[in-house]
């Protein structure tokens, strides 16, 4: 399928009908033409009539009928990516068009496994866009708990059930949905992801070895830091280069300070360990009780944000 170039005349006919929300015309065209046979690579941004309908940003009953008609006429179009590799499902999530997400994934559950050019599955996009209800729905589809998968796609359903592993699937920059959620999402999103796959809470990304907790610290998301700690995040985790959470937190929060202040900041790492010997930047610091108390005092009065973050890390 897809060996015949999509003709310009037909493209304009479809676009005109979509722009007018002309459901009857779309139904007639889908009956008259086999839209499944066309190659859409030469069309603008490699988009199909289904992409165009989603991109209208119109969530009326008429547009829903148009989307349903086109998707039913050609199941293949649900899986086709545009120039950015985004399928109609990706675009529907970006547009927060929940009804379109539901009908497209019910007609073609396999579309949930397709990645765009950045390596993002629809689940990844939904987490990134903080679309909690869509993420819940995707989990429902993947686990087949709602019975929405039809018999036509029974084989796809089997694959999709195993695709729960996509929670750990990394995109091209080697971060997974839980790492993105720790940086930008609400606590509800993090709890939902962890609920479906508890081990991910301490998953290290492949590039730096950051766990979700490191990502939350990086963006100074104190609420997410507290949640991850409560859910069992490993406070002793280290990155691939051996950096611990305390050192990383202080370096992130004081990164723009002078070198002299950074030297003091390194001493403050003792806050997470109490008295003892701490090795930072290949140098060892011996911290006695008095020095540890002094560090706590410096942090509390001079760097309240550091104090609040380290307090979160220590429980």
Image: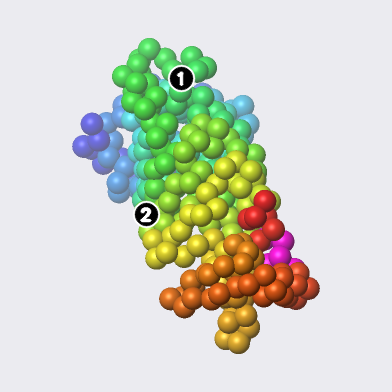
Q: Nearer the viewer, residue 11 or 100?
A: 100
Using the image, determine if residue 225 lies above or below residue 250: above
Residue 174 point in image, percent of width and height = 39, 54
Q: Which residues are magenta?
A: 303-309
**Helix, strand or loop status at disc 1:** loop
Residue 189 point in image, percent of width and height = 60, 40
Left or right relative to 151: residue 147:
right
Which quarter of the figure has residue 240? bottom left
> Looking at the rendering, in which quadrant would you find the N terminus?
top left
Check disc 2 and report the residue beneath it.
206
Left or right relative to 275: residue 86:
left
Q: Residues within 10 Å of mark 1 (few under 14, many from 20)?
A: some
Using the image, determine if residue 3 lies above or below residue 31: below
**Helix, strand or loop status at disc 2:** loop
The way the protein has been coloured in the rendering is rainbow
**Which tag, 2 or 1, sits closer to the chain's start?**
1
In the rendered structure, does residue 157 fall within the stretch colored magenta? no
In this orientation, does residue 257 appear? no
| For discs 2 and 1, the disc positioned in front in the rendered view | 2
Check disc 1 and report the residue beneath it.
144
Residue 10 point in image, percent of width and height = 37, 38
User: Magenta residues: mostly which secondary structure?
Assistant: helix
Q: CA distance from mark 2 to mark 1?
A: 30 Å
Tell which residue pokes out farthest to the top in this image.
151
């Amino acid at each position: 399928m897809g060996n015949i170039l999509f003709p310009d005349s037909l493209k304009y006919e479809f676009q005109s009908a979509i722009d007018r929300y002309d459901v009857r015309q779309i139904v007639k065209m889908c009956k008259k033409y086999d839209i499944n046979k066309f190659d859409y690579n030469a069309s603008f941004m490699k988009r199909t009539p289904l992409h165009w309908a989603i991109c209208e940003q119109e969530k009326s009953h008429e547009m829903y009928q148009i989307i349903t008609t086109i998707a039913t006429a050609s199941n293949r179009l649900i899986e086709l990516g545009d120039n950015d590799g985004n399928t109609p499902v990706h675009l529907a999530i970006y547009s927060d068009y929940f009804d379109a997400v539901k009908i497209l994934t019910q007609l073609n559950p396999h579309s949930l496994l397709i990645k765009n050019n950045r390596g993002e599955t629809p689940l990844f996009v939904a987490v990134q866009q903080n679309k909690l209800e869509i993420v819940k729905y995707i989990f429902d589809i993947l686990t087949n708990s709602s019975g929405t998968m039809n018999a036509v796609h029974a084989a796809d359903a089997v694959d999709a059930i195993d695709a729960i592993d996509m929670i750990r699937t990394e995109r091209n920059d080697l971060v997974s949905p839980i790492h993105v959620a720790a940086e930008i999402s609400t606590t509800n999103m993090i709890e939902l992801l962890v609920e479906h796959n508890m081990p991910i809470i301490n998953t290290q990304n492949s590039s730096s070895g950051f766990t979700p907790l490191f990502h939350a610290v990086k963006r100074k998301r104190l609420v997410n830091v507290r949640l991850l700690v409560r859910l069992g995040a490993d406070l002793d985790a280290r990155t691939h280069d051996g950096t611990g959470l305390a050192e990383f937190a202080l370096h992130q929060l004081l990164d723009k300070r002078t070198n002299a202040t950074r030297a003091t900041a390194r001493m403050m790492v003792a806050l997470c360990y109490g008295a003892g010997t701490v090795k930072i930047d290949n140098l060892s610091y011996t911290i006695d009780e008095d020095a540890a108390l002094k560090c706590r005092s410096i942090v509390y009065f001079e760097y309240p944000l550091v104090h609040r973050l380290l307090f979160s890390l220590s429980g």
